[in-house]
Image (cartoon, rainbow, N blue to C red):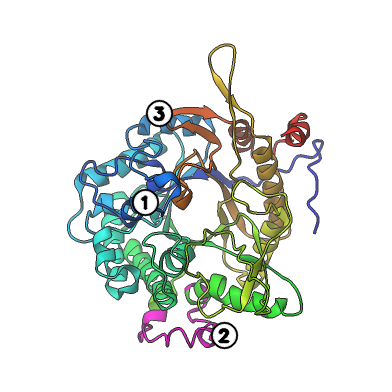
Amino acid sequence: MPTAPNDPAQPLTFPAGFVLGSATAAYQIEGAAAEDGRGPSIWDTFSRTPGKTWNGDTGDVAADHYHRLEADLDLMASLGLRAYRFSIAWPRIQPTGRGPANPKGLDFYSRLVDGLLDRGIAPVATLYHWDLPQALEDAGGWTNRATAHAFAEYARIVGQSLGDRVAIWTTLNEPWCSAYLGYGSGAHAPGRTDGAAALTAVHHLNLAHGLAVQQLRAVTTNDPQYSVTLNFHVLRGRGDGGKEAVRRIDALANRSFTDPLLRGHYPADLLEDTAEVTDWAFVQDGDLAQIHQPLDLLGVNYYATTAVRLWDGATSRQNHDGHKDMGGSPWPGSPQVEFVEQPGPHTAMGWNIDPDGLEELLLDLHTRFPDQPLVVTENGAAFDDRVTARADGSYAVHDPERVDYLHRHLAAAHRALTSGVDLRGYFVWSLMDNFEWGYGYSKRFGIVHVDYETQRRTLKDSALWYRDLAVTGSIPPLPAENAADIQAG
């Protein structure tokens, strides 16, 4: 389905109550890695290991959000955000992942939540955005069943502290990345390259989600909504074996989470495909009932599509799956699938730009789970932004490619909504430039530019465009100069 242009005479308007916000993650922006009782996380360890991140970058300082909380809250308010999706750093609450809460850690997030509410911004809290306490990894991490139970206790502690004020709780962000990139490919912390460990982590993350939802429901008092956020792979089959390649990767990437979380079982073909990797004996009686908890929202993260085909075994195997190659594979049990390079345009991450994929994904999820409300919890793009100085001494960042990206993806989300999808909101990734995991500070996703030497924040053109959207609820037309700027750039 081709992307329809926005007719300025008929602006695309989202319904009343549609949430327009932005998102960040704790390790990517907070800094203060060793302050006020915070313990080390797997990303502290991983980023300090030579060769794991671009330029040896770490999140020690990041965007210094921990020390600039009030100014950043004012920044959010100036953008008209209706909601802010942030993550809570587990090692800031429990330095070793177990034991009593760290009061200073709870106080930081309490001040954050209060500051949002004071500015009319709904707090959306994610309990886990990849920063596992290192002490838990030392005991096996997500391959250890005990980690799921430790996570449930952590959820209870945070729920007791903030459970009278948070509007939406998200248990996990992108468990696919935690499991398959962290334990399979080695591209993310903790950097392990073991397919069986990755599949074990899949199950224990699913179990952690279910246990955490139950703990939150037991202690929250303000009638919040409960969710999980998944990064879905929108797959394009290529060649005669494309359909089989899509089936295999869909099972690993998508259905390994949606089926247990939303249907209460693992897909039979996933178990068959991975039988030579693991026997799935880590799934114990009663686990699936614990995992299968009712959800108020399903978070949908979307950036690009993925093209797959069956490898012929003779030519050089392509591996354009959008992730850093660190020696391992995030696709246990499917070495016969190769990931084909797709035509541009591409973002600075090398990801193809395909807004129709978002519409397709939302429609597909609505078809398969018709009673499940959805929210786009991440969508955005990295580009090579350039800062220009104005005559008055202020700064500007003209990012026409990002404005175009957001415009087209929001139009796609609006088309899905008008086609009957129960879509409740959209969160742009990301509020500000930040530590982009293995890519360090080399990739900029923010609608707000951060000068990492001075920590100066500068609103990019995309922030000004998004502000108009957040304030009016209607997708603003593209600036007249946008197409010319993209062509020139």
**Which sits in the foreground, 307 or 247?**
307
The type of residue carrying mark 3 is: Ala
Q: Position of residue 248 (x, y in %)?
A: 60, 78
Which label lies toward us, 2 or 3?
A: 2
Circle 2 packing at 10 Å, graded few (<14), some (14-19), many (20+), is: some
Kindly report the distance in space between the C-alpha atoms of the residues bearing marks 2 and 1: 36 Å
> Closer to the N terminus: mark 2 or mark 1?
1
**Which sits in the foreground, 454 or 355?**
454
Circle 1 packing at 10 Å, graded few (<14), some (14-19), many (20+), is: many
Q: Is residue 293 above or below residue 432?
A: below
Q: Residue at x 38, y 87 (%)?
A: 281
Kindly report the distance in space between the C-alpha atoms of the residues bearing marks 1 and 3: 28 Å
Q: Secondary structure at mark 1?
A: helix
> Closer to the N terminus: mark 2 or mark 3?
3
Question: In which quadrant is the C terminus drawn?
Answer: top right
Q: Which residue is mark 3?
A: 71
Magenta range: 261-288
Q: Residue at x 39, y 46 (%)?
A: 56
Q: Which residue is mark 2?
A: 269
